[in-house]
Image (cartoon, helix red, strand yellow):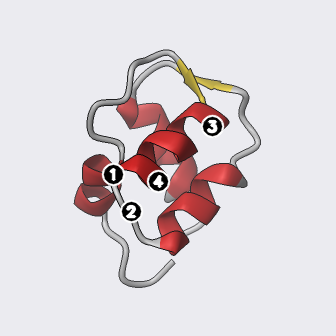
């Protein structure tokens, strides 16, 4: 996922309420006009529920 940084992800998820599912987080990112690469990565996360932004970041960037 070259070109996307943790701050990009944080900006995309600004205003998200936790705990949240990956589907809820994808919708927040879309509402924040996040790049398609971020919304697609969020929608493909296998975990059902995230307790905080750190868990989301860890899941999104785990393969890098």
Q: Upstream in the sequence, badge 3 or badge 4?
A: 3
Distance of label 1 from label 3 (alpha carbons): 15 Å
- Distance between mark 3 and mark 4 Cα atoms: 12 Å
Res 30 label: 4
Q: In the image, residue 63 lies at what x, y percent?
A: 60, 65
User: Furthest residue to the front?
Assistant: 31
Looking at the image, is mark 3 or mark 4 nearer the viewer? Answer: 4
Residue at 40% in and 48% down: 31
**Pick the front one: 46 or 28:** 28
Report helix, strand or loop for mark 3. Answer: helix
Q: Are marks 2 and 4 in contact (CB under 8 Å)?
A: yes
Q: CA distance from mark 2 to mark 1?
A: 6 Å
Cα–Cα span, label 1 and label 4: 5 Å
Quarter holding residue 14: top left
Of badges 2 and 3, nearer the viewer stands 2
* 2 or 3: tag closer to the N-terminus: 3
Residue hosting label 3: 22
Against 29, residue 41 (above or below) is below
Dot 3: within a 10 Å radius of its alpha carbon, few (fewer than 14), some, or many (20 or more) residues? many
Where in the figure is residue 22, as x and y percent of width and height? 63, 37
Q: Secondary structure at mark 2?
A: loop
Q: How many other residues sit within 10 Å of disc 1, few (<14), some (14-19) or many (≥20)?
A: some
> Do residues under tags 2 and 1 come within 8 Å of each other at their CB atoms?
yes
Q: Is residue 27 left or right of residue 2?
A: right
Name the residue that disc number 1 marks.
Answer: 32
Give SS at disc 4.
helix
Q: Which residue is label 2 attached to?
A: 34
């Amino acid at each position: 996922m070259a070109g996307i940084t943790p701050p990009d992800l944080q900006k995309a998820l600004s205003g998200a309420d936790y705990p949240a599912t990956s589907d809820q987080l994808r919708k927040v990112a879309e509402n924040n006009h996040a790049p398609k690469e971020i919304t697609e990565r969020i929608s493909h996360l296998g975990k059902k529920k995230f307790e905080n932004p750190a868990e989301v970041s860890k899941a999104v960037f785990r393969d890098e």
